[in-house]
Image (cartoon, rainbow, N blue to C red):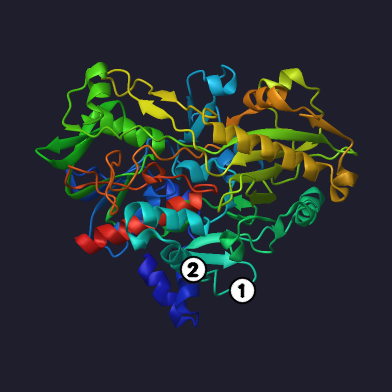
Amino acid sequence: MSRRALIQAGIAAGLSAPMSRAWAQAVDVVQASAFYDSRQLEAEYDYIVCGSGSAGSVVARRLAEDGDATVLLIEAGGSDNHPSILNPSVWFTNVGTERAWNFHSVAQPGTNGRNVALPMGRAIGGGSSINGMAYVRGHKLDFDRWADITGDTGWNYENALSTFRRIENFDGPADPGYRGTGGILTMQKDNDIQPVARALRAAGPAAGLAAFDDINGAAMESASFIGHPDIKVRDRQRVNVPADYLYPILDQGNITVITGATVSRVEVTGDRATGVSFVWNGETRRVGARGEIILSMGAIHTPKVLMHSGIGDEKVLRKAGVRTILDLPGIGKNLQDHTQATCIWEFREHTPPAALLFSQSIYFTNVGGGDRPDINAVQLQIPFPSERTAQDYDIPETGWSILSGLANPRSRGTVEIVDDNPETEVRIVSNILTADEDMRAMRHGIELARELGASPEMRDFVKREVMPGPITGAELESYIRDSASCYFHMSGTCQMGNGPDSVVTPDLKVKGIEGLRIADTSIMPEITMVPTMPPAVFIGERAGQLIRSSS
């Protein structure tokens, strides 16, 4: 039975239209997997979407949902029907496997000569299939800043909030001013908060962190707050973005999803994108687009594919041996991520990790005196050292950590191809902690984390502070560089805007190329303060709206 027929049957049975839509979306991962690679590849489609992550799956859904357009969705990874994807308890085991792109930066002075792991999802669902499942929508100042940079009010907080209310199916306390129900995007309030996470939230107000019951409500308009994030989990199983957006329409007949297909380049004729080349089942294939091509492969692969297509900084392309079609110097620049350093405490009593291992308390605050949060921090119920600090400290068997990160990093990195072979890995220079403002914020962030760890509310959960301890000055800075890693929120390498370094216009069109748009975190001119999955969904929704309104 088609999704439309399911909805009609639900209404006939007495369900409301929103409930009927939710019922029609109850397609499981096994059923969805049967549709991947099941249709004959056509020579041409109305739209080609490259990447099935948190933005790409949304774009594909919105372009295909009414059944009028044919859509090809190309995914380099495999099916999301895998135990380590579905089981929230072991999500972190995907890093280092074939279900992740296991990128690393080159050795960096900002991390005392260490390279930094930068994994990305490599499966249906992209990052939403291997991330920590926290759902935090985005701060008011994130979206308003994008609107200021682009001059387009469609990116502002008012529109973002309206979009989230429309698409959400929130399983939690009703708050119609901020939250949506009966929509397409599933999330729930975490109803199994562990004692150590509850204690951290209770410790927040004395440190200047206002406690909020709903981190996605009015908290996202506040300068300093603490609370428990929503989670993309249902019935103790991960709900990635395709489960909400793709699964319900896979049987319509007008959307084709192929997996294990690595996009090599966009084919350009004159000033128009006409198709894509990709390697699938060991063969190089080319498929044409009658309408538009949308790149949604993330902040590493989207600029990589553009550069291999001859679109990018002419100096970089010439050095790599790629003929320049269009000189767009901003491609691969402006790389950003949320850098973090860790504080660890040993539990007073032996306490194993929580059954569902993700952050149950998060906080945002301003330590630098500006008008927006500059620290975003998460708590984990495990010790979480870097490979360097694990050698320098006595790490306990059980403990808990605060990962204190930069909400608004000033440091900027680059992504560059090194030759003309699309299979060669890119060179990533993260440049984290090279800006003085970032180190100042990190020092203050570590001090705040240690203050929280020493608070009366946390006393029952602390046998000892494991690291960093009461160090200051140059010793603390060196510790931060040894501890530093990223939250895996790579963004910004194809930024939207109107300036000379912008790559896409505010309507997400690649400048100078017709029929080509980008919809993923690479378009962020400034990274959001929050985990990037929900903002990527908003980018996908906006892209779908913009494309459909122009067709």
Give the class, few, some or many, for how many residues have Cα within 10 Å of label 1's Cα (few <14, many ≥20). few
Q: CA distance from mark 2 to mark 1?
A: 11 Å
Q: Position of residue 124 (x, y in %)?
A: 44, 43
Quarter the C terminus occupies: bottom left
Task: Report the residue marked by disc 1.
Answer: 174
Please name the residue shown 54% across and 74% down the image.
177
Which is more toward the observer, 330 or 84?
Answer: 330
**Residue type of the residue flagged with mark 1:** Ala
Mark linked to residue 165 = 2
* Residue 87 appearing in the image: no
- How many numbered circles does the render carry? 2
* x and y, in percent, of residue 366 in the image: 62, 49
Q: Earlier in the sequence, mark 2 or mark 1?
A: 2
As rendered, which of 205 and 382 lies closer to the eye?
205
Q: Considering depth in this image, is 440 or 70 the residue closer to the camera?
A: 440
Q: Amino acid at mark 2?
A: Arg
Q: Is residue 29 above or below residue 174?
A: above
Q: Residue at x 31, y 61 (%)?
A: 545
**Residue 3, can we see it?**
yes
Q: Quadrant of the N terminus?
A: bottom left
Residue, far left? 270
